[in-house]
Amino acid sequence: MTDLVKNYIGGRWVEGRSGQTFETSNPATLEVIAPVVRSGAQDVADAVAAAKSAYSTWRLTPAPRRGELLFKLALILTERKDDLARLMTQEMGKTVAETRGDVQEAIDMAYYMGGEGRRLKGYTAPVEMPNKFGMALRDSVGIVGLITPWNFPVAVPSWKMLPALVAGNTVVWKPSEDTPASSAMFVQAFIDAGFPAGVVNLVLGYGDAGAALTEHPDVRILSFTGSTTTGLAVYSKAAALGKKVTLEMGGKNAIIVLDDANLDLAVDAITWSAYGTTGQRCTACSRLIVQSGIRPKLTEALLAKAKTLVVGDGLKEGVTVGPLVNQKALDKVSAYMDVARQDGADLLIGGGRDTQAGPGYFFQPTLFGGVTPAMRIAREEIFGPVLSMIEVGSLEEAVQVNNDSAYGLSSSIFTENVNKAFQAIRDLTTGIVYINHGTTGAEIQFPFGGTRGTGNGMREAGQAGLDSFTEWKSVYVDFSGRLQRAQIDTDAVLSGDLNGS
Ligand code: NDP
């Protein structure tokens, strides 16, 4: 067991005000990794005060200088990639190859948003009067509160923190209770890159710390990723206080396989989308919508591929599927096995805890056939290695089944027919669409987010990611130098010739 994992507030690692702690542990071995500070509302208030004090200087730091710190951060994360990845695997279970990819996303985002330090583009446009100039600028907002889940302990916070920081905001981050040590190691990289005290603050703890952050009057923006239930609770509280909120929530993503698909490509993509990260990705594929003609061959190939997966401790060489994150997740996924049986689905492989893999929360990669779109396993987010196969007759029916979901994050279609591919691009109503590729693997330069119950219309990453963390400021410069101009404008407005808003 290592030392107490502390909060980072105002440039110092500090213990919690209440003295309460909790433990972070390894879901593969069930060993305790470290005790952790459990923050309350007072710790959150301290962090917000530190962020407020740092904001006045940080917002005036030239954006190119802010960007340079992000480039330094990218270099440090590159050097520490293995150490960070191994700690993440110990805390939340996914394999080291996957946690390395998680860190890589943060590195990519640091380079991308570092470049924004020299762009942060606004625009000019012609104006209605002579001797007048108009422009729209992106402005920082103030203190940003970040609330994040455990499944991407570094990538998800980086999607929020890095655009927020380059835009001139300061942040208070409440990560998941399941990944506090990884979060602390990530914050250490900001410290070593030279971010000034108070610009990045970390408060560790449970949901009550997230709730305190949501309600704090000085936090102007909330950026949340997590379950739909928690996200909507954060949304309603924050909305009542007039705050801007970005939500990235649950998913029930599908891969459609048409009769003309390349079978090998489809099998590989389905396997990694459904069982990679033990099915605990917001973009994981949990519905397989398959056209009747290819279903028998696809089923056979998928079962053969599933048998090659190795469930075990993600730190071990050769393991391809790590454990579920905690006992609660194991209980939830297990309960869905009964739900599936009661609904009449056919269990084709898996279906239970994998006790051979070790003492941890291991679950067998599972495939159900004979699933109908109305069954609960086809509608609810299970967040485990469980795939439900739904048979359809046509592309149109496949699209209809895909779109009939409470969620709308990611979808995918396998077809060799370019006309069908474009028809799907037009008609699938998810925020992300893949052609001949699994439902995972988003790149940070494109907008990321979902429709319906997955989000609230905001997007992360790409240029769209900056919208969450900036306000538009429209500026009009009158350089006529003539006193009568105001009168001319007023007359014109009163006579209805000009827009007076
Ligand atoms: P949760 O909603 O349980 O938790 C998310 C974060 O919210 C955690 O930091 C949690 O703290 C905190 N929290 C809990 N209660 C409150 C509260 N009342 N007020 C404020 N914050 C609170 O999600 P999980 O961590 O279990 O993550 C899994 C979920 O995340 C899945 O539904 C998945 O689909 C979704 N997700 C979505 C993504 C997307 O981009 N759309 C990406 C990744 C995941 P604590 O951990 O201490 O409970």
Image: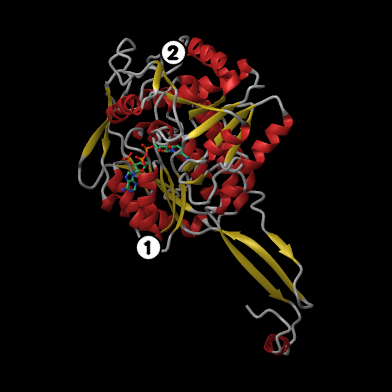
Along the line of sight, which residue is nearer the eye, 456 or 158?
A: 456
Give coordinates of residue 271: x percent, y percent: 51, 20
Quadrant in which residue 91 is drawn: top left
What residue appears at the point 35 percent right and 38 percent down from the top-left corner?
Answer: 176
Circle 1: is it few (<14), some (14-19), or many (20+) Cα within 10 Å? few
Amino acid type, mark 1 = Ala
Disc nearer the start of the sequence (1/2): 1
* Count of labels in the image: 2
* 53 shown above or below 111: below
Circle 2: is it few (<14), some (14-19), or many (20+) Cα within 10 Å? some
In which quadrant of the rendered image does the C terminus lie?
bottom right
* 60 shown above or below 326: below
Quadrant in which residue 400 is drawn: top right
Q: Label for residue 319?
A: 2
Q: Which residue is mark 1?
A: 240
Give coordinates of residue 185: x percent, y percent: 41, 33
The residues tagged by marks 1 and 2 sit, at their Cα atoms, a distance apart of: 47 Å
Q: Label for residue 470?
A: none
Quadrant in which residue 235 is drawn: bottom left
- Asked if disc 1 and disc 2 are in contact, CB closer than 8 Å, the reply is no
- Disc 2 residue lies near ligand 1 with CB under 8 A: no
Left or right of 127: which side holds 91? Answer: left
Along the line of sight, which residue is nearer the eye, 432 or 206?
A: 432
What residue appears at the point 73 percent right and 90 percent down from the top-left corner?
Answer: 484
Left or right of 171: which side holds 205? Answer: left
Q: Secondary structure at mark 2?
A: loop
Amino acid type, mark 2 = Val
Q: Residue furthest right?
A: 130
Residue 420 visible:
yes
In terms of image quarters, where does ligand 1 lie? Answer: top left
